[in-house]
Amino acid sequence: MPGSLTRPASRIAQGAMTSLLALLLVLAIHPPARAGDTPTTTDPALAAAGWIAQQVETDPTLGVGSLADAIFAFAATGTGQTAAATALAGIETNIDAYVAPGGITAPGQMAKVMLAVQVQGADPTAFGGHDLEAELRAVLIDTGPDAGRFGTASVFDQAMVILALARTSGGAPASAVTWLSGAQCPSGEYSFDGSCPAGPGAEDPDTTAIALQALLAGGASTDAGEAVSWLLAIQQSDGGLPSFGIANTNSSGVAAQALRAAGETASADAATTFVTSLAFGCDADPAEIGAIGWAVGIPGFLIFSTPQAVLAFGSPPLDQLTAAGADEEAPVLDCATAGPAPTVSPTASLAPATPVPSGDAGELPDTSTGPAGPHPWVPIAALLVSAVAARIAVRRRRAVS
């Protein structure tokens, strides 16, 4: 019939078969993603981000500081934004007890939350019922011997506040940078409480690295150079940086971030090599695959060490870090491709472990004034003398959960 849309059945079947074969070919080349599929990687930094994402999504006990560290790690690796959104929501839910315990502003904690909010592109002037910027500026001391200090800020806290305010249109007050410069030890080091440690076994590269980033953000180039020199002087031949006598990945990660910002790329890369050497491979406990161990022969601390170790892998400083353009899902280690890899485990030669309180072991140290977080006591090998163990325990309780 003229104008009919019908055609012989054989031609319909032939056309359908051709279309089906074409579709199968496309699917073979570009298989669709299945719901629930997790991307995989052989990159240790991305695998670490994937491990962190699993902790954020499954562990409701993570403290605010831990969640902020996770956000920094996701932005540093350009991934994990689904988990980052979960982390930011967790921070907002628990913000009051963290940034103002007992109703008193805690500058370090507030600055850390503000940085996490800024990294995620949210508004720090209206977050969780707080104007974080205004509340921080309100505690700046204007006169007297502590002029430039933010309330009761420790050296570490002061640096964190400077980094957070450096990202605002008003910038960090010059007096705040001056106060931080005045807290520098003759060696170029900075310590958390402002004291000047005496040599090996008392190093504080964590505080020095954060202070270095703040000095760079505040334009204090001379003091920044002295901090760089001190970090380079304590760096070991394997690239690791010791904290209180033990080379570890969280100190090395934060130091690498700061050294890279200061233009010391080779030293930062060496620290990255050290961090990579402690990554858990495919023959580790399944719950640890992709994580980064704290130190050679010392188990535990994974939620403490991994997010900060990740900062060694090319992260910009905290005043410049951003999650913009990051991927939604963080990949996990591709064990089908990577195969078994060396893993971190306690060495048989170590003496029985001595327990010390870990505090909220997942946090970039920022204060020591709050109660310990929910994590259980974790072992440190008995090779640590009691004084060193005590110092490490204090560092791990620097943030409330």
Image (cartoon, rainbow, N blue to C red):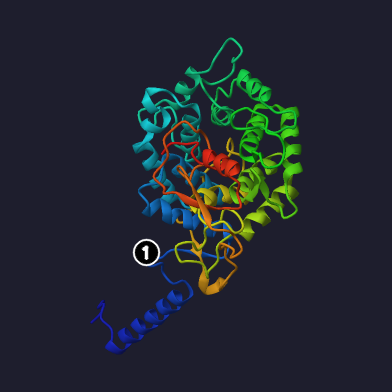
Q: Position of residue 73 (x, y in %)?
A: 53, 48
Across and down, in percent, residue 226 comes to 75, 32
Is residue 390 at all visible to an observer of this figure?
Answer: yes
Residue 315 visible here: no
Q: Nearer the viewer, residue 236 or 95?
A: 236
Quadrant occupied by the C terminus: top left
Circle 1 Cα neighbour tier, 10 Å, few/some/many (<14 / 14–19 / ≥20): few
Return the x and y of residue 304 as percentages of the image width and height.
Answer: 51, 48
Q: Could you say which quadrant of the image residue 131 lies in?
A: top left
- Quarter of the picture holding the N terminus: bottom left
Please tell me which residue lies in front, 144 or 358.
358
Vertical side of 230 occupied by 193: above or below:
above
> What residue is drawn where x is 50% and y is 63%?
289
- For residue 330, side relative to residue 315 (left or right): left
Up the image or down, 103 lies above or below 241; here it is above
To which residue does mark 1 refer?
36
Give the quarter of the image for residue 175.
top right
Q: Is residue 239 left or right of residue 279?
A: right
| Residue 390 quadrant | top right
| Percent x, y of residue 169 | 55, 25
In this view, 328 is above or below 133: below
Seen at 52% across and 58% down, the residue is: 291
Name which residue type carries label 1.
Answer: Gly
